[in-house]
């Protein structure tokens, strides 16, 4: 009988069983995130609840470590989760603590988002990649305004009290190519 080198045996024992590793990957891939709105803003993206905690740190607890954070200007930070195809803009209209920026985990507050990942769905089940016809089937009150489908709208209590899209679907080549929305946790 041939003996395996001790180091090879130790490495093999430290690896998780294939079935277990496959199961973990399948669970992560199966996770989906439902959008919910309330009071003229997106209140939930899956378990991320920006009304409770709109910080980058809170978003990372739900979506995992961001693949990039980019300071746009002094009060805006673009945060991307590449594997999810999710982008959230965080803002802070006050002063950041010394040595921190809007991209610091607890400083920026979720303001708006866009997503292109298929793991996200609206409260009525619309997803990126679905045919454009599904928009009106899923969201009977959707309206085509300024080049996108407004799935949920609200009226601003400020200024001229104009309507704005809380959640909108963007289409390209007969399919939903993106969904974007307003969170507004950074204030006015």
Image (spheres, grey):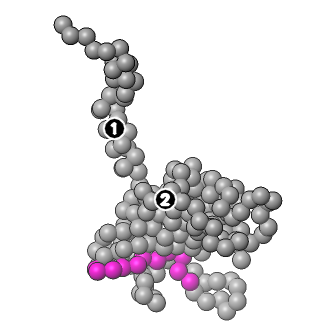
Q: Residue at x 41, y 67 (%)?
A: 116
Of helix, strand and loop, which one carries label 1? helix
Determine which quarter of the picture holds residue 186: bottom right
Task: Decide whether residue 167 is among the magenta residues.
Answer: yes
Query: Mark 1 sits on what residue?
Result: 23
Q: Residue at x 77, y 63 (%)?
A: 96
> Residue 111's x, y, as percent?
62, 70
Of helix, strand and loop, which one carries label 2? strand
Binning the other alpha carbons within 10 Å of mark 1 as few (below 14), some (14 to 19) or many (20 upward) gives few
> Residue 145's x, y, as percent?
45, 88
Specify the segment rendered in magenta. 164-174
In this orientation, which residue lies closer to the viewer: 43 or 59?
59
Furthest toward the left, the residue is 1
Query: Mark 2 sits on what residue?
Result: 81
In this orientation, which residue lies closer to the viewer: 154 or 80?
80
Q: Residue at x 54, y 76 (%)?
A: 166
Q: Look at the picture and state if 1 lies above or below 64.
A: above
In this orientation, which residue lies closer to the viewer: 167 or 55?
55
Say if residue 66 shows up in the picture.
yes
Q: Work out which quarter of the rendered image holds the N terminus and state it.
A: top left
Cα–Cα gap, marks 2 and 1:
23 Å
């Amino acid at each position: 009988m041939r003996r395996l080198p001790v180091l090879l045996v130790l490495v093999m024992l430290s690896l998780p069983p294939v079935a277990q590793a496959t199961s973990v990957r399948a669970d992560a891939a199966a996770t989906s995130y439902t959008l919910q709105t309330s009071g003229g803003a997106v209140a939930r993206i899956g378990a991320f609840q920006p009304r409770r905690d709109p910080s980058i740190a809170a978003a990372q607890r739900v979506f995992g470590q961001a693949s990039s954070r980019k300071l746009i200007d002094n009060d805006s930070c673009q945060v991307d989760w590449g594997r999810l195809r999710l982008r959230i803009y965080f803002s802070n209209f006050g002063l950041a603590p010394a040595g921190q920026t809007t991209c610091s985990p607890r400083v920026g507050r979720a303001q708006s988002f866009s997503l292109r990942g298929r793991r996200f769905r609206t409260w009525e089940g619309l997803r990126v990649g679905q045919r454009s016809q599904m928009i009106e089937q899923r969201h009977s009150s959707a309206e085509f305004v300024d080049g996108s489908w407004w799935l949920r709208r609200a009226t601003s209590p400020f200024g001229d009290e104009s309507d704005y899209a809380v959640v909108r679907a963007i289409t390209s080549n007969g399919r939903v190519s993106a969904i974007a929305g307003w969170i507004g946790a950074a204030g006015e």
